[in-house]
């Protein structure tokens, strides 16, 4: 029986990078697709960024593949008006997707595309494990004419489950990032991570790093990191910073995972946004979307050989000279797609 995948093209370049991704998936397997609206497209059609029907369809699927949400036409500072990003946050919360995995491994063919020197990034291979459903993004919010607040809350259970994900993913070391010199939530974070490490993962090296130092070390010495564990907002910022190690945010995929018992469908999406400035021009880089599909094949559907085939095809295409505009080249979406398909075994 074919795996059922909910497709959420979203906004901006989203539909333009989703279409070739389905072509790529069809080249490696048989899947059943169910397409729905999210983000700004859903606001235009239904007045909300995520409808109950779409959330129910996602819950009933084997995996969810999302392209991008957002754009200036929906930007607002009015707390009573819907924003596209609410669809993404609602999906994460509604599916219980508490663990966001963002691998960062610059490819040798693109070392010179990074703003950092080759010798600085060579050999970098790290994973950012970001807590996804707690913290300041989901805390109680208040707004008056002269003040506003966002409450940051974490429980020991939330910290322990994301820390366990990081320790299980780590090869040798976990760098737990916090701001324990200032924030009470970070002090609890550090205590819970340390206790879990001592109890279940003493064979994995653990270090605690303040977030400002971690941001500096990502640029100064990225090879220092194996697995970075951190809370929601810090992880959002650090993973986008780490994206530049690879030369472009247009290359980075992500996976958002929840509980395995009972199993929860994962959400797979590129790290980049909807890029409304290039929407409709045919210039969008689809590679992060392709690699997100590969993460879906591996982590969401258990299809390891198919995932490896997609990743290998992307790498071989880049080795052969494929360069989209964000990588300093001229290839558009269609040219990049043809190059990857030509290298698919």
Image: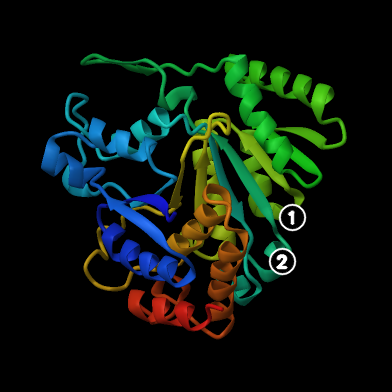
Instruction: Of the two numbered discs 1 and 2 on the same chain, state the one appearing first in sequence.
Output: 2
Quick check: 217 above or below 311? Answer: above
What mark, if any, has residue 122 been given in the picture?
A: 2
Quarter holding the N terminus is: bottom left
Q: Which residue is found at the position 35% from the left and 39% from the top?
A: 58
Determine if residue 47 is in view: yes
Determine if residue 179 is in view: no
Q: Are marks 1 and 2 in contact (CB under 8 Å)?
A: yes
What percent of the width, then of the height, locates residue 96?
A: 46, 29
Quarter holding the C terminus is: bottom right
Which residue is at the front of the view, 258 or 149?
258
Q: Classify residue 93 as left or right of residue 70.
A: right
Secondary-structure class at tag 1: helix
What percent of the width, then of the height, locates residue 48?
A: 19, 34
What percent of the width, then of the height, locates residue 121?
A: 68, 63
Quick check: 321 above or below 228? Answer: below
Q: Which residue is found at the position 58% from the left and 70% from the top?
A: 309
Q: How is the image coloured?
A: rainbow
Q: Residues within 10 Å of mark 1 (few under 14, many from 20)?
A: some
Q: Which residue is found at the position 66% from the left and 73% from the top?
A: 108
Q: Classify residue 229 as left or right of residue 306.
A: right
The span from disc 1 to disc 2 (Cα, nearest Å) is 8 Å
Secondary-structure class at tag 2: loop
What mark, if any, has residue 223 been given in the picture?
A: 1
Q: Classify residue 128 as left or right of residue 95.
A: right
In which quarter of the view is residue 223 placed?
bottom right
Q: Residues within 10 Å of mark 2 (few under 14, many from 20)?
A: some
Which residue is at the front of the view, 316 or 189?
316
Q: Which residue is found at the position 36% from the left and 17% from the top?
A: 149
């Amino acid at each position: 029986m074919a795996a059922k995948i909910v497709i959420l093209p979203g906004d901006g370049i989203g539909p333009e990078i989703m279409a070739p991704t389905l072509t790529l998936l069809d080249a490696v397997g048989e899947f059943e697709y169910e397409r729905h609206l999210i983000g700004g497209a859903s606001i235009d059609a239904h007045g909300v960024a995520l409808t109950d029907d779409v959330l129910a369809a996602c819950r009933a699927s084997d995996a969810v593949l999302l392209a991008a949400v957002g754009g200036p036409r929906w930007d607002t500072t009015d707390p009573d008006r819907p924003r596209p990003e609410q669809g993404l946050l609602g999906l994460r919360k509604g599916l219980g997707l508490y663990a966001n995995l963002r691998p960062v491994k610059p490819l040798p063919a693109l070392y010179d595309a990074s703003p950092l020197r080759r010798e600085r990034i060579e050999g970098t291979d790290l994973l950012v494990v970001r807590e996804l459903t707690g913290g300041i993004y989901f805390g109680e919010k208040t707004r008056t004419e002269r003040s506003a607040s966002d409450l940051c809350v974490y429980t020991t259970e939330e910290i322990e489950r994301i820390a366990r994900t990081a320790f299980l993913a780590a090869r040798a070391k976990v760098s737990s990032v916090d701001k324990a010199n200032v924030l009470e939530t970070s002090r609890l974070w550090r205590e819970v991570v340390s206790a879990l490490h001592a109890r279940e993962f003493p064979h994995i090296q653990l270090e605690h790093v303040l977030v400002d130092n971690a941001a500096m070390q990502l640029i100064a010495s990225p090879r220092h990191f194996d697995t970075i564990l951190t809370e929601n907002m810090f992880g959002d910022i650090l993973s986008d910073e780490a994206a530049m190690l690879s030369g472009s945010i247009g290359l980075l995929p992500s996976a958002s995972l929840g509980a395995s018992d009972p199993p929860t469908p994962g959400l797979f999406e590129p790290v980049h946004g909807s890029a409304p400035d290039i929407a409709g021009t045919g210039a969008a880089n689809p590679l992060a979307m392709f690699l997100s599909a590969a993460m879906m094949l591996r982590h969401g559907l258990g299809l390891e050989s198919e995932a490896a085939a997609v990743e290998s095809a992307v790498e071989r295409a880049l080795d052969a000279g494929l360069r989209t505009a964000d990588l300093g080249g001229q290839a558009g979406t269609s040219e990049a797609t043809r190059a990857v398909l030509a290298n698919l075994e």
